[in-house]
Image: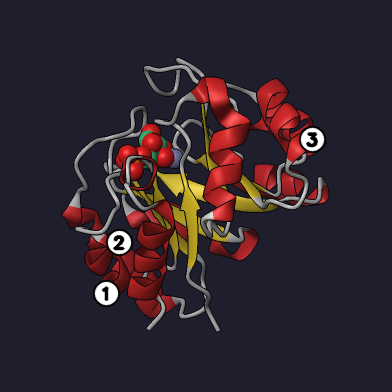
Amino acid sequence: SLKALIGPSILNSDLSKLLEESQKLLDNGADYLHLDVMDGHFVPNLTFGHPIVKCLHNHIKDAFLETHMMVSKPEQWITPMADAGVNQYTFHIEPITNVEEVCRKIREHGMKAGVAIKPGTPVAEVEKYISVADMVLIMTVEPGFGGQKFMEEQMSKVQYLRKQYPLLNIEVDGGVGPSTIDCCANAGANMIVSGTAVIGAEDQAATINLLRNAVQR
Ligand code: DX5
Ligand code: ZN
């Protein structure tokens, strides 16, 4: 059956302490880490790339690492990210036409393939690729920045997918925290990304637990 998994996003943490922040999240019960990679082109912001991910991986070998590739050329970073120790490579389908090929290449590199859509992209666009992917990410904010408001209307996409595909891993990302988790859980999401709500929490472990318990019922 489907597992509820919580993957905190370190985007809004103190990135000069990336390892400490990551270790703390894992110690506090994070199931995986969601690493937001931005290229300043697909989204109007920059973060970090495979050199930093590789350094992080070297210090936390057991952690499951997902990179959320908000980049215009997802194909370009598959090999370097696989070499960096990434477990799941989630990319946006919007800028490319060879999505199947990219998914195949990701899997050939030993990673799981995640396909992501922005709020303005219809769910049918991503549904086409479910047979070649391991997960679908439904964005609940415009990608580019942490700390934005959750877009509840995106839940119709999650509901639709959950109804058609009972065993599909469906991830939500953007504005997810204690006040919006029930919405995500009711719609059928099982992989939960949470940035500022977890990073800024007074009790990180309790917040991660609360999110997981809300989903796993
Ligand atoms: C947005 C990123 C998200 C985001 C999550 O572009 O993909 O992962 O930073 O952070 P919160 O939970 O603060 O929206
Ligand atoms: Zn993300």
Q: Is residue 158 above or below residue 141?
A: below
Query: Disc 1 marks which residue?
Result: 186
Image coordinates for residue 172, horizontal then vertical, percent: 38, 55
Q: Residue at x 46, y 80 (%)?
A: 166
For label 2, the crowd category at 10 Å Cα-Cα, with few meaning under 14, some 14 to 19 and many 20 or more, is some
Q: Is residue 168 above or below residue 151?
A: below
Image coordinates for residue 137, horizontal then vertical, percent: 44, 52
The span from disc 1 to disc 3 (Cα, nearest Å) is 37 Å
| SS class, disc 1 | helix
- Mark in the foreground, 2 or 3: 3
Residue 58: image tag? 3
Question: First in sequence: mark 2 or mark 1?
Answer: 2
Question: First in sequence: mark 2 or mark 3?
Answer: 3
Query: Disc 2 marks which residue?
Result: 157
For label 3, the crowd category at 10 Å Cα-Cα, with few meaning under 14, some 14 to 19 and many 20 or more, is few
Residue 77, by quadrant, is top right
- Looking at numbered disc 1 in the image, what kind of residue is underneath it? Asn
Residue 175: image tag? none
Is residue 41 left or right of 104 when viewed as pictured?
A: left
